[in-house]
Image (spheres, coloured by chain):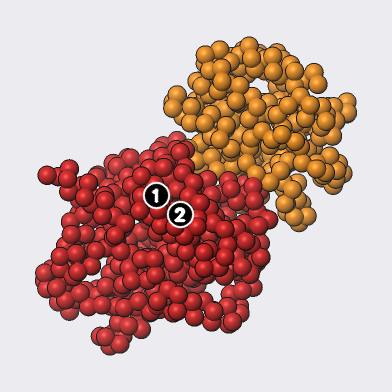
């Protein structure tokens, strides 16, 4: 049986390690390839999956993830198709927790209740809705709580103390700390004081903490290992998919092994 | 639903059921900072005095409310007045908001201005305001819009702005908005995002409406002076909806005044061929706000089309969505070819070359004027001049031949 996101990160913290959380866009470059990539991710040691739902106007994403969303939509991906992919992954033995990563409008159009039921029936544990701040999330939270669907909200270097409390109260799976002011994408160096910030968050929040945005190299993962409960690597993997569209599976698996065996 | 329609949005930025603030966490801090700064500044009479002085001496306000005698006679119905925003400095109403927000940016200590632009009028207005206040300026513009509004690209560069082409998505206004948001989250310490229409996350719809409301206040005084009474109808084009909300705002409580917004009908009201949100869209969440948007069944933004880059947008300002649902305003559309015809008509009859955006309002006026009868007073908000569109009009005339 699949653990919850919270259980997975709790285990990581207990072992003084960080869970390794790859992000890939569902349907990039197509659903069949996504399936193979994700199976390879688990075999390579991923502890949890952040699975992108493509959106036409991804304002929080840098060019790498934007292009992935475009490829996915061009291949015909829909939210329903993403749910089907999750179902298929479960039937093929993928057991790591899956967190859907979506913009709000596709979820809003489906309806919160329907979204949660379908996601759970498919086998997802929770979701992060990137343009839904806690201030706008009352209806969504009511629905997620009724169904024990895990929620993840974002915070960042500019989040005020009072808003950090809101983020913590709204999240039930974990809190996702955006490592820097900016959009998704690789960066050369991790921000100064990132480790201090992470330890302050871990001390001050009831939730477990994952960190992402701009973490791309084995060296960066090594620097952060044990400093957060989970480490998300996204754009670096998405870029590999882009560069090896014909057969990305091998490359991705190799890269994840490198990222894991810092 | 009890809504005081002539008031500010609620504390969470909602106009009725629409608006709000749907953004990633990284945008929350700068939006809260902006909201605080505006709440503070808008309490100060000295701020409004400086704004008024700039509107008079730099922008050239007030703009005339002109009786369009030959158009009125030609259409043979309603008595038509034109609110001449095309005569404002830089050639459109956009400068009102640009000046207001540049004062706000200065107050916040920001030195770098970014903006999105569709037709380029907001980009030109922003580049102008930034030049006049000694700030650096970057304008994001869809690559397709850059090609069809070349002259405005050159104008922005002359004014010292950097114009950055946006190649994502549909390469139009919505993609420029997303790109400006991405820049902003990466540079919030020194940068103000000078959003050009009454849309996006709270507090933008309110700020832009407030700065554009000068159009309505002037028009109201002017029509009372000319005619001794309020108009029966006001017609304005609606892209994001800032010129329309600007003129509507002074008349919203006068329930006898018909408020009519005109959207882009493109070539047909079919997916991908128009930008009439109230005819083909439904409520959703897009670029920071809850509002009517053009979308497919899966919640993805639909492609849009209009001959006019300034109306070619997926969403609409949230206050318009409220006015629509309250039935306080009605929303029609004009097709590309109707707008082009109106463009030529106004040039020949009144000696005014209107922007293709404003031509949509003229086109709708042409449709309804006769039926309204001669006692009907109608104001068209002529939001901008059409010099920028001459290339497009030439191209279309060539295709027709």
Labelled disc at residue B313: 1
Query: Does residue B56 appear to the left or right of B274 in the view shown?
Result: right
- Please state the chain letter of the residue tagged with numbered disc 1 in the rendered image: B
Query: Does residue A117 appear to the left or right of B332 in the view shown?
Result: right
Identify by letter the chain in orange.
Answer: A
Quadrant location of residue B108?
bottom right
Quadrant location of residue A125?
top right
Q: Is residue B44 above or below residue B271?
A: below
Identify by letter the chain in red.
Answer: B
What residue appears at the point 58 percent right and 37 percent down from the top-left corner?
A62
List x then y, in percent, for residue B43.
61, 78
Secondary structure beneath label 2: helix
Q: Quadrant of the C terminus of chain B?
A: top left
List x then y, in percent, for residue B352.
23, 67
Q: Which residue is mark 2?
A: B157
What residue appears at the point 26 percent right and 85 percent down from the top-left corner?
B226
* Same chain check for tags 1 and 2: yes
Q: Is residue A49 above or below residue B235?
A: above
Whether residue B151 is visible here, answered yes or no, is: yes
Labelled disc at residue A7: none
Q: How many marks?
A: 2
Near-viewer residue (B119 or B262): B119
Whether residue B101 is visible here, answered yes or no, is: no
- Please state the chain letter of the residue tagged with numbered disc 2 in the rendered image: B
CA neighbours of label 2 inside 10 A, class few (<14), some (14 to 19), many (20+):
some
What residue appears at the point 68 percent right and 26 percent down from the top-left corner?
A22
What residue appears at the point 52 percent right and 31 percent down from the top-left corner?
A67
Secondary structure beneath label 1: loop
Near-viewer residue (B69 or B373): B69
């Amino acid at each position: 049986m699949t653990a919850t996101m919270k259980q997975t990160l709790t285990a990581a913290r207990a072992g003084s390690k960080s869970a390794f959380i790859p992000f890939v866009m569902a349907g990039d470059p197509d659903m069949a390839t996504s399936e193979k990539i994700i199976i390879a991710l688990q075999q390579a040691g991923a502890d949890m999956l952040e699975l992108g739902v493509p959106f036409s106007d991804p304002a929080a994403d840098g060019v790498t993830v934007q292009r992935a969303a475009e490829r996915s939509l061009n291949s015909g991906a829909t939210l329903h198709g993403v749910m089907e992919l999750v179902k298929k992954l479960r039937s093929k033995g993928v057991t790591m927790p899956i967190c859907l990563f979506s913009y709000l409008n596709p979820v809003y159009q489906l309806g919160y209740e329907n979204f949660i039921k379908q996601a759970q029936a498919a086998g997802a544990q929770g979701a992060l809705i990137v343009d839904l701040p806690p201030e706008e999330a009352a209806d969504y939270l009511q629905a997620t709580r009724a169904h024990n669907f895990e929620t993840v909200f974002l915070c960042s270097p500019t989040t005020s103390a009072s808003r950090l409390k809101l983020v913590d109260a709204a999240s039930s799976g974990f809190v996702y700390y955006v490592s820097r002011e900016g959009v998704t994408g690789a960066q050369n160096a991790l921000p100064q004081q990132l480790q201090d910030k992470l330890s302050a968050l871990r001390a001050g929040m009831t939730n477990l903490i994952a960190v992402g945005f701009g973490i791309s190299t084995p060296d960066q993962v090594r620097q952060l290992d044990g400093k957060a409960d989970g480490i998300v690597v996204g754009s670096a993997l998405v870029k590999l998919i882009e560069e090896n569209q014909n057969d990305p599976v091998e490359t991705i698996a190799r890269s994840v092994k490198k990222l894991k065996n810092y | 639903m009890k809504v005081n329609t002539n008031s500010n949005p609620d504390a969470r930025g909602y106009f009725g059921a629409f608006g709000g603030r749907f953004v990633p966490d990284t945008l929350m801090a700068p939006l809260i900072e902006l909201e605080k700064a505006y709440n503070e500044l808008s309490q100060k009479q000295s701020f409004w005095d400086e704004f008024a002085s700039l509107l008079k001496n730099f922008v050239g306000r007030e703009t005339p409310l002109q009786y369009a005698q030959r158009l009125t006679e030609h259409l043979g119905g309603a008595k038509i007045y034109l609110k001449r925003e095309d005569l404002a400095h830089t050639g459109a109403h956009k400068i009102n908001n640009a000046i207001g927000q540049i004062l706000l940016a200065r107050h916040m200590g920001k030195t770098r201005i970014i903006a999105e632009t569709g037709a380029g009028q907001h980009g030109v207005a922003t580049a102008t305001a930034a030049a006049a206040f000694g700030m650096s300026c970057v304008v994001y513009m869809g690559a397709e819009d850059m090609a069809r509004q070349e002259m405005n690209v050159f104008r922005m560069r002359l004014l010292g702005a950097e114009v950055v082409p946006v190649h994502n998505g549909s390469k139009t206004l919505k993609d420029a908005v997303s790109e400006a948001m991405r820049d902003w989250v990466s540079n919030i310490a020194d940068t103000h995002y000078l959003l050009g229409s009454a849309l996006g996350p709270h507090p933008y719809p309110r700020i832009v409406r407030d700065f554009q409301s000068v159009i309505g206040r002037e028009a109201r005084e002017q029509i009372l002076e000319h005619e001794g009474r309020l108009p029966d109808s006001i017609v304005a084009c609606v892209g994001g909806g800032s010129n329309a909300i600007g003129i509507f705002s002074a008349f919203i409580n006068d329930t006898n005044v018909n408020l009519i917004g005109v959207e882009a009908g493109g070539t047909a009201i079919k997916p991908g061929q128009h930008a009439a949100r109230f005819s083909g869209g439904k409520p959703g969440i897009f670029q920071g706000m809850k509002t009517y948007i053009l979308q497919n069944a899966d919640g993805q933004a639909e492609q849009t089309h209009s001959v006019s880059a300034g109306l070619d947008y997926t969403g609409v300002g949230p206050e318009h969505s409220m006015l629509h649902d309250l039935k306080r305003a009605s929303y029609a559309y004009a097709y590309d070819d109707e707008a082009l015809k109106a463009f030529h008509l106004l040039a020949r009859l009144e000696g005014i070359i209107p922007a293709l955006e404003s031509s949509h309002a003229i086109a709708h006026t042409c449709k309804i004027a006769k039926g309204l009868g001669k006692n009907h007073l109608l104001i068209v908000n002529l939001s901008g001049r059409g010099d920028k569109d001459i290339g497009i009009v030439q191209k279309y005339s060539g295709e027709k031949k």
